Amino acid sequence: MCRPNSAVDFMASHNLQTSQLALTSNIGMSPRTEGGLGDLHAASQLIPKNEPYVMLNMMNFKPEAQYDNDFEGSPSNPISGAEAYTIYRQAFGKRATELGVKNPAVLFLGKAHTNLIAGPQEGESWDFIVMVRFENFASFKMVLEDEGYIKLIQPHRLAAVREFRSFAVSEIH
C-alpha cells in the first residue's frame, strides 16, 4: 500500500469528499481563553450525524480551583483544579445517565508527560488527556445544553481548568 503524499491523496484513497475533511471539530475554547464552549450548533454541522465519535480533551488545571462566589456547590475548603475536575467528571457521568445518554465510554484517561515534537519547554503542554466515546454528538450536546448541567456541573469544570482543547473526532473507515 502506498503512503499518501498529501491530504488530497489521503482523502482520495479513502473515498472522502472535501466536506468530509472536517473529521475533527474544535468544540472547546478558542486557543487562549478559558471556560466557555465554542458554537455547538456550528460544530454539530461538521460532525457526522448518528455515528459514534470520540471526544478528545486536553487540559491544564489551575493550581487551586477558582469558583465563582455565587456558586452554591463550591467546596467548603480550597481544592486543586485537578480535584475540581474529578468532581466535574463524576457529576457529568451521572447527569448523562439521567438524561438517557447511552454507553459513553472512557477510552483513555491519562497524564501527558511531555511534548515530543517541541520539547517540554516549548509549545503546548497538557496536564491531562481524556478520550470519551459517545454514540453520537447529539447526545453529548444534549448534556452540555441541559440546565442542570449548566448550573450545577459546568461550574466545576470552569473552576478547574486553566486551558482546554476539546476535539470531536470520527473514525476513518
Image (tube, rainbow, N blue to C red):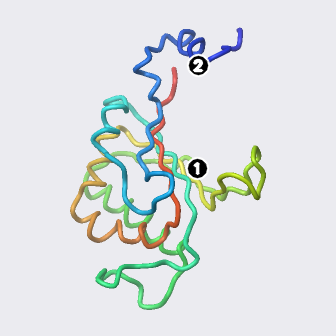
- Residue occupied by mark 2: 7
At 32% from the left edge and 46% from the top edge, which residue is drawn?
Answer: 39
Estimate how packed mark 1 is, as few (under 14), some (14 to 19) or many (20 or more) residues with alpha carbons within 10 Å: few
Per the rendering, the mark at residue 12 is none
At 40% from the left edge and 42% from the top edge, which residue is drawn?
Answer: 134
The residue sitting at the bottom extreme is 77
| Residue 87 location, quadrant | bottom left
The residue sitting at the front extreme is 32
**Horizontal and vertical percent position of residue 159:** 44, 73
* Residue 139 versus residue 149 in the image, above or below: above
At 63% from the left edge and 62% from the top edge, which residue is drawn?
Answer: 127
Q: CA distance from mark 1 to mark 2?
A: 27 Å
Camera-side residue of 13 and 39: 39
Residues at circles 1 and 2 in contact by the CB criterion of under 8 Å: no
Camera-side residue of 151 and 91: 151
* Mark 2 residue type: Ala
- Residue occupied by mark 1: 108
* Mark 1 residue type: Phe
**Horizontal and vertical percent position of residue 169:** 48, 36
Quarter of the image with the N terminus is top right
Camera-side residue of 32 and 39: 32
Report the mark closest to the observer, 1 or 2: 2
* Residue 94 versus residue 81 in the image, above or below: above
Q: Is residue 100 left or right of residue 60?
A: left
